[in-house]
Amino acid sequence: MKSEISIKVTDKYKAEYAKGYPLITKEALENPEALQNEGSILKLTDKQGRFLAKGYYGLQNKGFGWILTHDESETIDQDFMERKLATAIGRRQAFYSNLETTAFRVFNGEGDGFGGLIIDYYAGFYLLSWYSEGVYTFKDEIIAALQNVTECKGIYQKKRFDTKGQYIEEDDFVTGERGEFPMIVKENGVNFAVYLNDGAMTGIFLDQRDVRNTIRQKYAKGKTVLNTFSYTGAFSVAASLGGAAKTTSVDLAKRSSSKTIEQFSVNGIDFETQDILVMDVFNYFKYAKRKELKFDVVILDPPSFARSKKYTFSTSKDYTNLMKEAIAITERNGVIVASTNSASFGMKKFKGFIDKAFKDLGKKYSIVEEFTLPSDFRVQKEFKEGDYLKVLFVKLG
Ligand code: SAH
């Protein structure tokens, strides 16, 4: 049993927590110095000592931990985890029974009642991501709970917190059967090669499922498609399968080229009919302008922050400029798929960045599709920041 530490909350946050806000922040605490070991159970009270909620201490860039329950009598033990996991799995029954999509999110942190823990499903295997040393202290209970509530072929994990250089690759495998990699998963019938045992990323960002499907079904046929910040080329594969005339994938990372070839290949697409470029997107924009290249569809999915040799890109400062670059090489009546996963601003502000780009250029546009996170990436309505994904399909003219 973990020990409980009593922590007092400021009046301002008392109201927030009563309304269901899940994040424990430093400003919320009257006596943060009482926090000692990550993973301790925190009993939050108001200044008078009246019970508000229970949570745990875990340091993440977002805050100091997460609220787990508003019921004083509830203990945070394996049974608690089983209840949370069973509910989360129950909510995703439609995914489990869909043979065309075999990779999805099973447990989305605070959206499913346990901030700092993410669980994804990949064709019978489970991948757990731990976002703090604090949440990692619950590892044994969470893994036992998962095995009790569902059948797992094998379990892998990613520690997404600072382990002071102690990160060992073998740490990725936890228990059960070992997978064979690449593992081929399906998403709306499209194949993707994934690796659960190879560093921080698996090869596919599951949150873009609906966007990939929309590109394939409605926007690709006969079109030339430029995919910038393409990573493993997942959007390019979707476009190509949707009948694109040609795709061009651009990413700075050297590995992106072999990874993109692999994703095309597992879908039976001859990668040599596509362009795959390892280069800085900003240099590519210059090159395309010089060569007067234009595309029917341009996909923009930059990281929130990136630094290359020549350029620094921060979504909140530079999206308008990025849009302008894209507009310059998009055909009349073409479509720009503008995406961001930055949690630091909402949809309204994102639309503002796009609007400004068109206004500055004196051009017209309309928004023809709008996406936020898909349903398996469950978000809590009291925690809007959790709904980080924003994707707009912007039609020129
Ligand atoms: N759109 C991708 C995910 C993008 S992840 C998908 O749907 O799978 C962000 C990618 O941007 C990384 O692969 C990184 O290598 C790349 N990147 C970052 N800065 C870049 C730059 N200046 N030019 C090209 N690629 C860049």
Image (cartoon, helix red, strand yellow):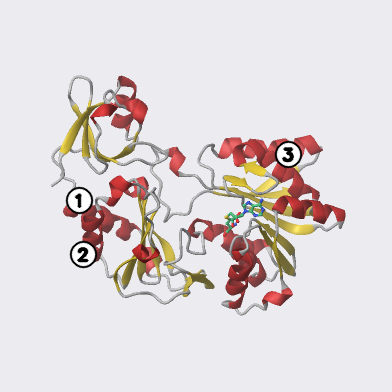
Q: In this view, does 92 lie to the left or right of 315?
A: left
Q: How many residues crowd around disc 1 within 10 Å: few (fewer than 14), some, or many (20 or more)?
A: some
Residue at 21 percent of width and 40 percent of height: 41
Residue at 70 percent of width and 37 percent of height: 355
Residue at 65 percent of width and 57 percent of height: 252
Q: Mark 3 points at which residue?
A: 357
Question: Closer to the N terminus: mark 2 or mark 1?
Answer: 1
Q: Mark 2 points at which residue?
A: 148
| SS at badge 3 | helix
Q: Is residue 215 left or right of residue 284?
A: left
Residue 270: give x, y in percent of width and height. Answer: 67, 78
Residue type marked 1: Phe
- CB at disc 2 and ligand 1 closer than 8 Å: no
- CB at disc 1 and ligand 1 closer than 8 Å: no
Q: How many residues crowd around disc 3 within 10 Å: few (fewer than 14), some, or many (20 or more)?
A: many
Looking at this view, is 99 or 323 the one in front?
A: 323
Q: Mark 1 points at which residue?
A: 80
Q: Is residue 278 left or right of residue 188?
A: right
